[in-house]
């Protein structure tokens, strides 16, 4: 089944990506706020548990629990594992880095995927894309260099999240033709919540009501952001929506300044610009090559 590429589908895909990015950045802000008082496992568990409230209402509205039947359980399980790993590493990143710094490094994901595509997909990556990948990684090095005193995990965590999220999106794209967005998201959230439960250092303890309210808002934003992201991949390929995904860096810089008084420095600006420019070039190049290799329409 080929994803529709009509103007209406493209607009829907772009809209889903913009909404997803805004919601996820708001969610990242609350996660960073909570990380000063709660362990990573606690954040994953309570956020995941409370996110089932809006997701359950959505499943009920779409026809009940029979929607949870999946045609490809192995792929759904793989997607859930990659999504849980991404969430874990992003929470660790936000604990140690400003929001804009963490997200700028995470956005190297498309470049990582391009670098590995020859191994994973058997693709031939030409010299132009290799140069773009190299420039993007130079941008990451520029962002990391000024923070030489930060613990190593603060650098490895967002890089690991970038790799996991890129692989997650590949699996999500393949699932879009057979499983609905709410079905894919449900199993991903179940696994992330379970991992959070077993990773709680002090066992299950009930947070204060004020903290539970923040967890509820975080869970709702997290579930909605992932839902819109999955829906976007069902409408159109990621290369078309790539420019709009980078709007999250703008939201992150604004919220980081307003909430935590984080001011992005010049190194972050230069490095993020290189990453964004390289990512956009790779996306445009892959889209052009796909168009050239597409079979001619039958007459």
Image (spheres, grey):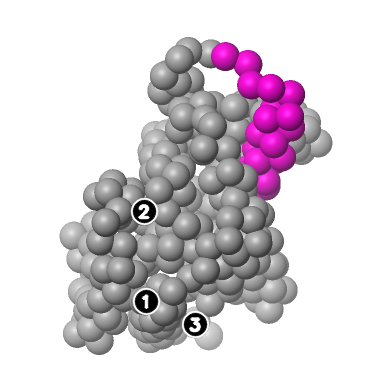
Q: Earlier in the sequence, mark 1 or mark 3?
A: 1
Q: Is residue 124 left or right of residue 68?
A: left
Q: Which residue is mark 2?
A: 158
The reply to whether the C-beta atoms of the residues labelled 2 and 1 are less than 8 Å apart is no
Q: Bounds of the magenta span?
A: 205-225
Q: Which circle, 2 or 1, is nearer the viewer?
A: 1
Q: Is residue 150 above or below residue 45?
A: below
Residue 74 lies left or right of residue 258; in this view the side is: left
Real-space CA distance between mark 1 and mark 3, rounded to the nearest whole angstrom: 48 Å
The kind of secondary structure the magenta stretch mainly shows is helix
Nearer the observer, 260 or 1: 260
Residue 171 appears in the figure: no
Residue 206 part of the magenta segment? yes
Query: Residue at 71% across / 40% down in the picture?
Result: 217
Q: Nearer the viewer, residue 81 or 105?
A: 105
In the visual, does 99 lie left or right of 58? left
Residue 273 to residue 25: above or below = below
Q: Which residue is mark 1?
A: 267
Q: Secondary structure at mark 3?
A: loop
Q: Which mark is residue 297?
A: 3
């Amino acid at each position: 089944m080929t994803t529709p590429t009509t103007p209406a589908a493209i607009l829907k895909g772009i809209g889903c990506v913009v909404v997803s990015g805004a919601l996820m950045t708001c969610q990242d802000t609350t996660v960073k706020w909570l990380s000063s008082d709660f362990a990573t496992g606690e954040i994953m568990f309570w956020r995941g548990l409370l996110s089932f409230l809006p997701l359950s209402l959505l499943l009920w509205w779409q026809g009940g629990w029979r929607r949870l039947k999946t045609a490809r359980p192995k792929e759904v399980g793989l997607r859930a594992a990659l999504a849980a790993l991404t969430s874990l590493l992003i929470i660790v990143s936000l604990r140690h880095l400003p929001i804009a710094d963490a997200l700028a490094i995470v956005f190297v994901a498309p470049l990582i995927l391009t670098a590995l595509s020859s191994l994973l997909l058997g693709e031939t990556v030409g010299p132009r894309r290799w140069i773009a990948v190299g420039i993007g990684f130079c941008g990451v090095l520029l962002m990391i260099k000024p923070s030489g005193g930060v613990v190593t995990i603060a650098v490895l965590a967002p890089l690991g999240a970038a790799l996991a999220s890129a692989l997650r999106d590949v699996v999500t794209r393949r699932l879009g033709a057979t499983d609905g967005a709410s079905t894919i998201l449900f199993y991903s959230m179940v696994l992330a919540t379970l991992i959070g439960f077993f990773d709680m250092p002090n066992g299950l303890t009930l947070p204060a009501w004020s903290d539970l309210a923040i967890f509820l808002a975080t869970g709702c934003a997290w579930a909605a952001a992932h839902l819109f992201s999955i829906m976007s991949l069902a409408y159109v390929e990621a290369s078309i929506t790539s420019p709009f995904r980078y709007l999250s860096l703008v939201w992150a810089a604004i919220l980081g300044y307003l909430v935590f008084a984080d001011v992005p420095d010049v190194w972050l600006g230069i490095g993020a610009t290189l990453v964004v420019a390289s990512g956009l070039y790779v996306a445009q190049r892959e889209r052009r090559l796909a168009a050239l290799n597409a079979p001619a329409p039958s007459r």
